[in-house]
Image: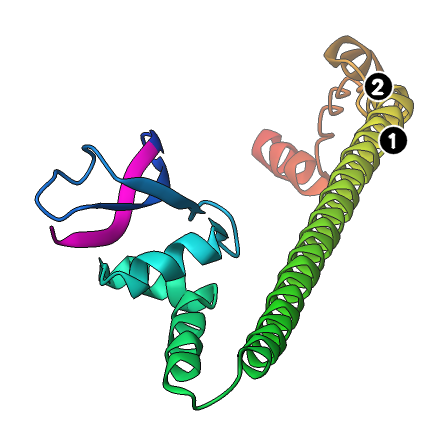
Amino acid sequence: MSVKIRLQRHGKKGKPFYWVVAADARSKRDGKYLEKIGTYNPNTNPATIDLNLDSAVQWLHNGAQPTDTARAILSYKGALLKHHLDGGVRKGALTQEQADAKLAAWLEAKAGKVDSKKEGLSKAKADEKAKALKAEKAANEKRIAAAAQAEAAVVEEEAATEEVAEVEATEAPAVEAEVATEEPTAEVAAEETPVAEEAPAAEETPAEEASEEEKEA
């Protein structure tokens, strides 16, 4: 019987969660399996992997072939390295203690890299959050300043309008009084206008009187 180590899908729609299983190669992907040897959750960063290392290595010893994704998971957790070291022990290339020491050193280094990545992600997340808060604060301050400036402009405009209205209300009676003083009514003007005197009749000149006397002589 050909055995494959592969992923079996579980979880909700849009949030998949996988089991790492050893199953008959002829069975369906989500069908029956021979043994569940781990879980894989890609919804976290970094992805969460829980693997039974000894069971996975045993299936590899028995000839199980992992799929590409399962192989990446087994390599990430050190199953492929342990399988290789166990082969070296069987061939006499190194002792079990040496193989265990190499595996422990590799796992420790791997854990350090994972922790460093988690710290980097946490720091990046914190920096991003702080940056977002700073940007939001700056935007709020800018919005408040703009609102205050607009309100000040409205108040200034209202004050100017009220001042103009007061000036107009104060000057209007004075202007009307001045107009009334400078422009008398037609009736008063008629009374003040002198009536033209009749011109006296012209007296007869001496020349005309002489002519009349000559005529009588």
Position in image of residue 130 (x %, y %): 73, 55
Give the side of residue 59 with respect to residue 169, left or right: left
Q: Single out the residue that lies furthest toward the top.
A: 187
Q: Position of residue 37 (x, y in %)?
A: 39, 46
Residue type, numbered disc 1: Glu
> Which residue lies at the image location 78% right of the left edge and 35% below the top edge?
151
- Residue projecting furthest to the bottom: 93
Does residue 40 belong to the magenta stretch?
A: no
Quadrant placement of the C terminus: top right
Front residue of 162 and 14: 14
Q: Nearer the viewer, residue 141 or 108?
A: 108
Report whether 19 appears left or right of 25: right
| Residue ranking furthest to the left | 26
Task: Tell me if residue 9 is in the magenta stretch.
Answer: yes
Task: Please give the range of residues in magenta.
Answer: 1-10
Identify residue for label 1: 163
Q: Is mark 2 on a helix, strand or loop?
A: helix
Q: Residue at x 32, y 41 (%)?
A: 35
In the rendered image, which residue does mark 2 sit on?
A: 180
Q: Is residue 137 left or right of residue 5?
A: right
Q: Which amino acid does label 2 sit on?
A: Ala
Residue 126 — which label? none
- Give the x, y percent position of residue 27: 11, 39
Q: Where 11 sits versus 38, above or below?
A: above
